[in-house]
Amino acid sequence: MSILRVIRYSFSFYKSYLLLSLVITTCSLWLFWQYGLSIFFALFWFKIATLALTFYFINSYKSKQYYYYYNLGTSKAWLWGITLSFDFLLFLFLIILTYHLK
Amino acid sequence: MIHKLEVDSIQLAFNERRILSDIYLKCETGKITGLLGRNGEGKSCLMKIIYGTLNIEKSVRFDNIACYTPFKKPGLIRYLPQFNFLPKNFSLNRVFKDYDLDYSFFERKFPEFATRQRVSVGSLSGGELRLVELYIILKSKTSFVLLDEPFTHLNPIQVEKAKELILEEKRNKGILLTDHMFRHITGIADSVYLLTNGKTHLVKNIEDIETLGYARF
């Protein structure tokens, strides 16, 4: 299976928690804009914790949907690996961008 | 060429209660294999074990080659679980595109879905949703399909259409099928296994089903 397909399926999966994640990232960016570097480590761990909670929530309440992706040849590890990495890297990128804009 | 799926050496227990212990099952392309059993006998677990999403000690072989995670090979096997698995926010168009299927063929087969490719999965009735799930698993490119209670939520007309679809696809695939509507299974299956007390029994004639305590005629 092509990597492009895996990315497409992963993005479809990502949409199941994209809104929640964007809200958390936006709140973190606002706090970072207000308080600067002093709050960075708190926000860092806050983001990690919310991603862990998201993982727990999706695993508990939307686990049946994994079969949609299994039948397309995409494992749970791939779905989470790609989407969590992307989400966290996006968060870091936006924090750095905010730091330079401030 | 006929392909063969064989399963044995399965040991499954929950809280020291043995569920599966003496299993042998064979499914071949071009044939429908039925699997019957009462609630809690382990039919769905057996399907998940074959598919690889329930990870326990087992021997699942495709053409005599062992495979431990068949679910990672959609060209080899696909699985219709007994629950609804399509994401509710996806459109039918999206689902058919993901599974490389042409919606117009589906429309022709099921006119009630005509011009509805943009509707979301969540807006379908239980029967319609089950029919879409069954169709995409059955019609997608793969050698074997596992169908766990495909007739659930379907009305009698839809059941007949689903059976037609299964019979049509048996030309291209090996189909392992389980459902409580056992007469539909015995009506279309080429061979039937009955799962009782953790063991599979190959049903040789319809009386065996009564003898093994699954149903009364």
Image (spheres, coloured by chain):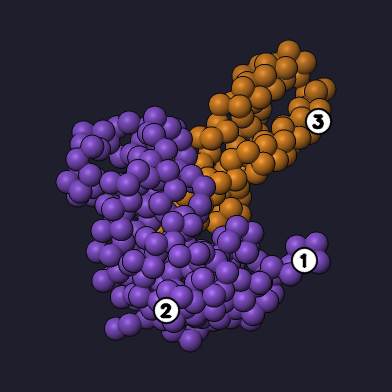
Chain colours: A orange, B purple
Chain ID, mark 2? B
Chain ID, mark 3? A
| C-alpha separation, residue under disc 3 versus residue under disc 2 | 70 Å
* Label whose residue precedes the other's in the sequence (1 or 2): 1
Residue B44: x and y in percent read 57, 60
Co-location on one chain, circles 3 and 2:
no
Rendered residue at 70%/40% (across/down): A56
Discs 3, 2 touching: Cβ within 8 Å = no
Q: Which residue is mark 1?
A: B17
Q: Secondary structure at mark 1?
A: strand
Looking at the picture, tell me which residue is in the foreground, B99 or B41: B41
Q: Which residue is mark 3?
A: A41
Co-location on one chain, circles 1 and 2:
yes
Q: Residue furthest bottom?
A: B64
Rendered residue at 72%/20% (across/down): A32
Q: Which mark is residue B205?
A: 2
Residue A57: x and y in percent read 67, 37
